Image: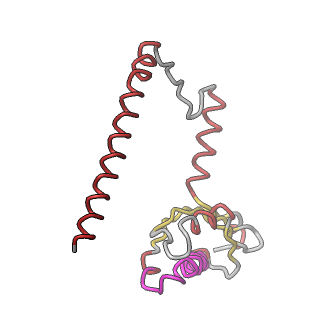
Amino acid sequence: MSSSAQEGVSRIYTINLGKAQLTPRYRRTDRVVNMIREFASRHMKTDEVKLDQELNRQVWKKGKANPPRRLRVRMIKDEDGVVIVSPYEEATKKENDEEAIQTGEDVGHEPKPEPSPDIEEENLKEQPKIQEKETKKAKTGKKRSKTKAKKSEKK
């Protein structure tokens, strides 16, 4: 394969990160980052791998102990041999947004129907009923705690 064929290579992968669950809890997300780097270097045949900020946020979103089990990523290799790994979902959303803008469609925004005045009146009537129920629950909760206290005093 010639060097000109490798320039600007872009590929999309789904990386299975389930084996990270075998590592101790407090090291799992660190292990996931290393697994992504290893995967990228193996498949794109280079040692220089950089992770996109958005991908890093996606990996660390649930904390250090609960990384995602799989990720859909786009890997782009530039002419210097540096691979940039970014989330694939972001790229597809941008393409869809651009297409919709070109066609003149409203992107992901549905018009919200305005509530009718009848519904608003019903909601206003129901609010006092809800408040009454809440106060009854609070009162019964106090009675229960008093009875439990009496039982414990008797023992």
Quarter in which the C terminus is drawn: bottom left
In the drawing, does residue 58 fall left or right of residue 147?
right
- Magenta span: 21-42
Q: Which residue, as the protein is rendered here, is positioned at the far right?
A: 80
- The part of the image, by quadrant, that contains residue 123 is top left
Q: Which residue reaches farthest top?
A: 117
> What is the quadrant of the N terminus in the image?
bottom right
Place of residue 147 in the rendered image (x, y in percent of width and height, measured from the top left): 26, 59
Q: Count the numbered circles shown.
A: 0
Quadrant housing residue 73: bottom right
Rendered view: 107 above or below 43: above
**100 is higher (above) or lower (below) than 125:** below
Q: Which residue shows up at 71% across the image and 79% down it?
A: 48
Image point (62%, 27%), residue name = 103
Q: Is residue 135 magenta?
A: no
Q: How is the image coloured?
A: secondary structure
Asked if residue 35 lies in the magenta stretch, the reply is: yes
Q: Residue 143's x, y, as percent? A: 30, 52
Q: Quadrant of residue 19?
A: bottom left
Whether residue 24 is situated above or below residue 121 in the rendered picture = below
Tell me if residue 38 comes above or below residue 100 in the rendering. Answer: below
Q: Residue at x 62, y 39 (%)?
A: 97
Whole-percent x, y for residue 89 in the image: 56, 53
Please tell me which residue lies in front, 26 or 50.
Answer: 26
Say left or right for 18 vs 29. left
| Residue 117 image position (x, y, % from top left) | 47, 13
Q: Nearer the viewer, residue 110 or 3?
A: 110
